[in-house]
Amino acid sequence: MKEKFKEYMNEFLYYIEHIRGYSDNTVSTYETALKKAIELSDIRVDDGIIVMDILPLRMEISNMSKRTIAKYISSIHSFAKWLKDIKQIDIKLRADDNVKVPSTIPKAIDKNYIEEVFEDADILQKALLSVLYGAGLRISEVSHIKVEDVQGDWLIVQGKGDKQRQIPLHPKVKESIDRYIDTYNPKKWLFEKKERQMSSHQLGYLIKKIFKAKGISASPHKLRHSFATEMLQEGARLTDLQKLLGHESIATTQIYTKLADSKKMQDYLSSHPLASSKK
């Protein structure tokens, strides 16, 4: 039974990567969770129904963070749903209660730091920074941008689940992209190496390297957070930001309102007349 489940797992991983368009990191997370789940869980047939008891897994990962445990459970739920919907397999999970994870506010990078990095960036680096910070894209979306997706003042983006959206390009972002295309002349993919598509991992490494040279801890995801936070601070509507970021639910976008409020409070406190007073 477990060998058959391993086959199902490989089919599922192919599905979420190539059909649903999930990022490399997300697919890797699913693979880690499902491999351990299949290895440790009690899988049996009971009255014609496949029962997958993940209690042994829950005990094994009990010392992990709530967030990690929640990712494991979520991965298993998605896999079970796929088995029911796509493979028409009657499966029942046991000990699959969800874990309540406290919401955390994502960290943004100080705008001054980003501007400092922009100043010393080369043509390729500026183009990459522009689509991450200037358009708020996911690194997986950047990896899949084709040259033909750059259409005048607009950028066509293939988001999660292969959902397409149009992003308006700020003149500075467009200038960086146009200059990069004129210089590097990419054939198919906007970011490619030896005419081969650059992966999310390769592009993410470039970003971390650029900021590390300045002694700044950064990631593509933090640049996306910074874009969203600053948009809200400057008065952008939440519904507009939701469309730009490609969020299905407005609730996902709302977390940035907390971050924007916290930054406003920091700005207020640092500029307060008593901020520099001594006790």
Image (spheres, rainbow, N blue to C red):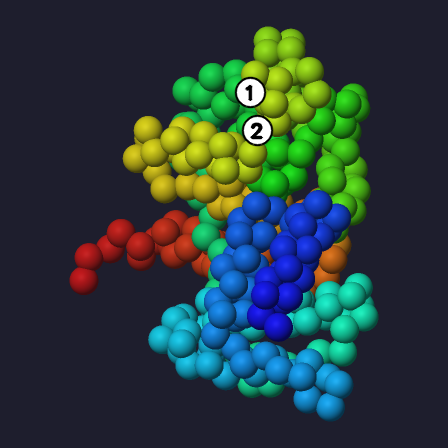
Three-letter code for the amino acid on which mark 2 is drawn: Met
Three-letter code for the amino acid on which mark 1 is drawn: Lys
* Residue displayed at 52% across by 77% down: 41
Residue 171 visible in this rendered orientation of the protein: no
Horizontally, residue 93 falls left or right of residue 123, namely right
Question: Residue furthest toward the top?
Answer: 183
* Label 1 secondary element: strand
Image spot of residue 144 (x, y percent): 67, 34
Query: Which numbered circle lies on residue 198?
Result: 2
Query: 119 and 60: which one is in front?
Result: 60
Horizontally, residue 96 falls left or right of residue 88, namely left
Query: Which numbered circle lies on residue 215?
Result: none
Query: 241 and 262: which one is in front?
Result: 241
Q: Are marks 1 and 2 in contact (CB under 8 Å)?
A: yes
* Label 2 secondary element: loop
* Residue displayed at 75% across by 85% down: 48
Which is more N-terminal, label 2 or label 1? 1
Horizontally, residue 66 falls left or right of residue 30, namely left
Image spot of residue 70 (x, y percent): 52, 71
Query: 103 and 254: which one is in front?
Result: 103
- For the residues marked 1 and 2, what is the alpha-carbon distance in whole angstroms? 6 Å
Classify 115 as above or below 24: above
* Residue displayed at 67% across by 24% down: 189
In the rendered view of the protein, which quadrant contains the C terminus?
Answer: bottom left
Image spot of residue 143 (x, y percent): 61, 34
Residue 121 visible in this rendered orientation of the protein: yes
Image spot of residue 251 (x, y percent): 67, 65
Question: Residue furthest toward the bottom?
Answer: 47
User: Dot 1 surroundings within 10 Å: few (below 14), some, or many (20 or more)?
Assistant: few
- Residue denoted by label 1: 193
